Image (cartoon, rainbow, N blue to C red):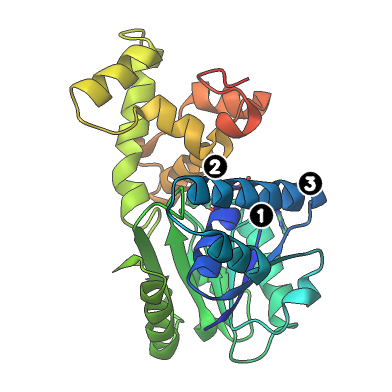
Amino acid sequence: MKKIAVIGSGTMGSGIAQVAATAGCSVKLYDTNQEALSRSKGSLENTLSKLVEKGKIDDAEKSRILNATSYVTTLQDLSDSDLVIEAIVENLDVKRKVFSELETLVSAETVLASNTSSLSIASIAASCQKPERVIGIHFFNPAPLMQLVEVIPAVQTSAEVLQKTTQTISDWKKVVAVAKDTPGFIVNRVARPFYSEALRVYEEGYADFATIDWSMKTIGGFRMGPFELMDFIGHDVNYTVTETVFTSFYFDPRYKPSFTQKRLTEAGFLGRKSGRGFYNYS
Ligand code: NAD
């Protein structure tokens, strides 16, 4: 699959587009928000310039990747794609609507994938006439740097689509873990207590968030503390994932979301991407 489309040019969509273009694919990036597309374009140029400065790629490679990436403003522009990867807001209804519309525009062979962190792939697939072509491809943030990609076949996904998808992602020099279609798949489920328990220690007043981060990095050996990581992911995304896992596991208290994080999200203090979360970035 060489003609790739990415829907959503935010944190993840931009990173996924970079990975695919670097691997030699042509990539179309679509977003409903023109500013998000411009930001994504600027950020790719910046990232590639830094890689040139560091000697990791040369100018020719930078130009090749930039030329391989285009920015489009209608879903129809994605009609000739081999693989479409959706990376929009983590909301099942919105994703289902996009998939059902997208399916009417692409060829019968196009593989349709979601980068959802926690939602049911079966439910997204059920919004399509050909659910066997739908699959989860879950990249981690930042997509160009993180090696692991979870590939999640739904109960409806065909063996051929699973095979084509794992082959493509391996060709992109990523390590594939095939995961079951359960809430949060593997990594996001295992990671829930990392965030939730840290939030509880903070809310109960036993330690401030900077101390918890410091402890987990200095003593625990983590590269980022839980609060830094939540700021990096985005509180809107991280909170929604926790809420989805909590409700999907029939309100198992192990996954209970945090009011502190809910309030940050409501206030628009989403972390790095908005300039303020637990920490200040402006
Ligand atoms: P983001 O908020 O950075 O970007 C989402 C983008 O989607 C925005 O630019 C928005 O304008 C666009 N968008 C929203 N609705 C749209 C629509 N109907 N059509 C086209 N574009 C639309 O979000 P993100 O962090 O990149 O997350 C995207 C997806 O990836 C979510 O499903 C999330 O759960 C998943 N994910 C996020 C992370 C992370 O660390 N942030 C990691 C893995 C997976």
Residue under label 3: 35
In-image side of 86 versus 143 (left or right): right
In the foreground, 148 or 194: 148
Q: Residue furthest left?
A: 219
Return the disc, 1 or 3, that comes first in the chain's sequence. 1
* Figure check: 107 above or below 188: below
Residue under label 2: 237
**Neighbours of disc 2 within 10 Å: few (<14), some (14-19), many (20+):** some
* Figure check: 224 above or below 65: above
Regarding mark 2 in the picture, which secondary structure is present there?
helix
* Figure check: 145 above or below 159: above
Mark 1–mark 2 distance (CA, rounded to whole Å): 15 Å
* Figure check: 264 above or below 58: above
Residue type for callout 2: Val
Residue 9: image tag: 1
Residue type for callout 1: Ser
Q: Is mark 2 within 8 Å of ligand 1?
A: yes
Q: Is residue 193 visible?
A: yes
Residue for point 32% across, 9% down: 207
Return the disc, 1 or 2, that comes first in the chain's sequence. 1
Regarding mark 3 in the picture, which secondary structure is present there?
helix
**Neighbours of disc 1 within 10 Å: few (<14), some (14-19), many (20+):** many
In-image side of 57 versus 272 (left or right): left
Residue type for callout 3: Glu
Specify the quadrant of the image occupied by residue 255. Answer: top left
Residue 167: x percent and y percent?
Answer: 38, 81
Q: Is residue 126 visible?
A: no
Mark 1–mark 3 distance (CA, rounded to whole Å): 10 Å
In this rendering, the label closer to the viewer, 2 or 3: 3
